Image (spheres, rainbow, N blue to C red):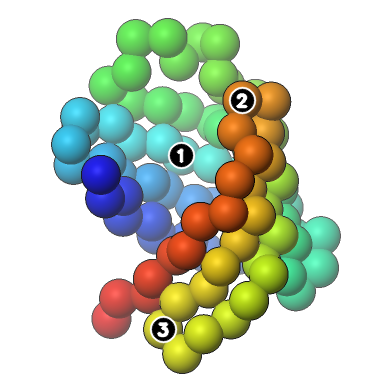
Amino acid sequence: METTIIRTDSTQIEFNDYDDIKIVSKVNWISDCEFILTYKDILNYSNKENLIGEKINVKILESKEHSYVCHVKSSTLDSKIEITKIE
């Protein structure tokens, strides 16, 4: 499953083409390598009321030329993922 992420300093939007879910989150930077995402809205998801306000801690562990590896942790998730930048 592939997700497209568009991020500014204060907002992140995730698009999931597989099931057409769109997640809008507030971005709060803690440092150059760490930020907290807070779910503001979720479109095309039936159980979104339980997720609005959910916080996800993201810590960038490694930067590569066109990607970075980060640790993502929330109340339901604790894993390392790699994000690839596309131009």
Residue at mark 2: 76
Q: Which of 80 and 58 is in front in this view?
A: 80
How far separated are the C-alphas under marks 3 and 1? 24 Å
The residue lying furthest to the front in this view is: 79
Left or right of 43 on screen, residue 70: right
Note whether residue 14 is visible.
yes
Q: Mark 3 points at which residue?
A: 66
Q: What residue occupies the far right of the structure in this picture? A: 30
For this view, does 2 lie left or right of residue 73?
Answer: left
Q: Please report the residue visible at 64 percent of the width from the left and 39 percent of the height from the top.
A: 78
| Three-letter amino acid code at the position of disc 1 | Val
Where residue 83 sits, quadrant-wise, is bottom left
**In the rendered image, is residue 10 in sight?**
no
Q: How many other residues sit within 10 Å of disc 1, few (<14), some (14-19) or many (≥20)? A: many
Is disc 1 placed on a helix, strand or loop? strand
Upstream in sequence: badge 2 or badge 1: 1
SS category of the residue bearing label 3: loop
Q: How crowded is mark 2: few (under 14 residues within 10 Å), some or many (20 or more)?
A: few
The image quadrant that residue 86 belongs to is bottom left
Q: Which amino acid does label 3 sit on?
A: His
At a point 38% along the width and 75% down the height, the residue shown is 85
Q: Compared to 28, does 17 lie above or below?
A: above
Query: In front: 18, or 87?
Result: 18
Residue topped by disc 1: 24
Relative to the observer, which residue lies in front, 37 or 76? Answer: 76
Instruction: Give the residue displayed 25% in from the left and 44% down from the top.
Output: 1
